[in-house]
Image: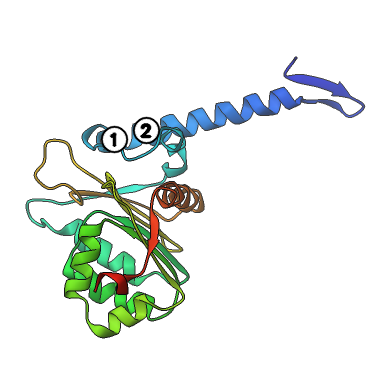
Amino acid sequence: MGLLEQDREGYKLTIYGLATLEKISDSFEFYSAYSKLEDFWKNQDISGIPKDLFARIGALKNATIIENTELNIIKSHEVFLKYLTSITDFFYGVTPIFHREWLKVCKGVIEDRPDTRIIATKEVISEVIKHADEEFMGLCQAGNVQTYMIRREPKVAFTVSDAGLSLSLSTKGSKCRFMEYDLYDDNPSAIKWGIDLFDYYKERAKPVKLADYL
């Protein structure tokens, strides 16, 4: 089958030609995203990203990396908190880590009732219940908040929302398991990629009620 075919209007791509063009475009975007973020991919444990989704990292070609520095060792944490406050419509997250300060910010987010779905380990859920106040627990048990527990600790920590994608991986050879670097991208292609990654983990988690852990 050829790449081109002729009709009355001239030459045009065949179905095979269109498919080939799409593959070339996908490959270009993959290598563009990989080369731009090469240090990030090489220094992080990427095993938490399934192969089919890693093959689509071209969707993250416009991403930026936030890195902690000697001058500001919590820079990625500060940027993440700011990111959370910009969420309005939906908020999906997968987390094997916990920080008490997130509760206050997340409380402000879910008060506005966005579609909220959280996948966490049993240990993280226990920490949330231990430190959350009664009002926060009430909000989490509202109809717009869905909670899932995953037994096998995910090797990713990320949030995807209408405000974009925030992705953190474990840094190789570092005592700081997550959030030494954070990838951010608010492009629609990155948001779609993040939703697909969330769905991957959702298939491996089970719905739970926080009240069951009180």
Q: Is residue 31 left or right of residue 73?
A: right
Q: Looking at this view, name the residue that lies furthest to the bottom.
A: 135
Identity of the residue drawn at 29% across and 85% down = 135
Quadrant where the C terminus is found in the figure: bottom left
- Residue type beneath disc 1: Trp
The foreground one among 166 and 139 is 139
User: Measured along the vertical axis of the image, is residue 161 above or below residue 47?
Assistant: below
The foreground one among 144 and 33 is 144
Q: Secondary structure at mark 2?
A: helix
Q: Which comes sooner in the sequence, label 2 or label 1?
A: 2
Identity of the residue drawn at 29% across and 35% down = 41
Q: Residue 3 at what x, y percent from top left?
A: 72, 19
Q: Is residue 70 left or right of residue 207?
A: left
The residue that label 1 is drawn on is: 41
User: Measured along the vertical axis of the image, is residue 47 above or below residue 8?
Assistant: below
The foreground one among 117 and 79 is 117
| Crowd class of label 1 (few under 14; some 14 to 19; many from 20; radius 10 Å) | some
Identity of the residue drawn at 32% across and 37% down = 37
The residue that label 2 is drawn on is: 34
Asked whether the residues under the numbered discs 2 and 1 touch, taking CB atoms below 8 Å apart as contact, a structural biologist would say yes
Task: Give the number of the disc on residue 202.
Answer: none
Q: Secondary structure at mark 1?
A: helix
- Residue type beneath disc 2: Tyr
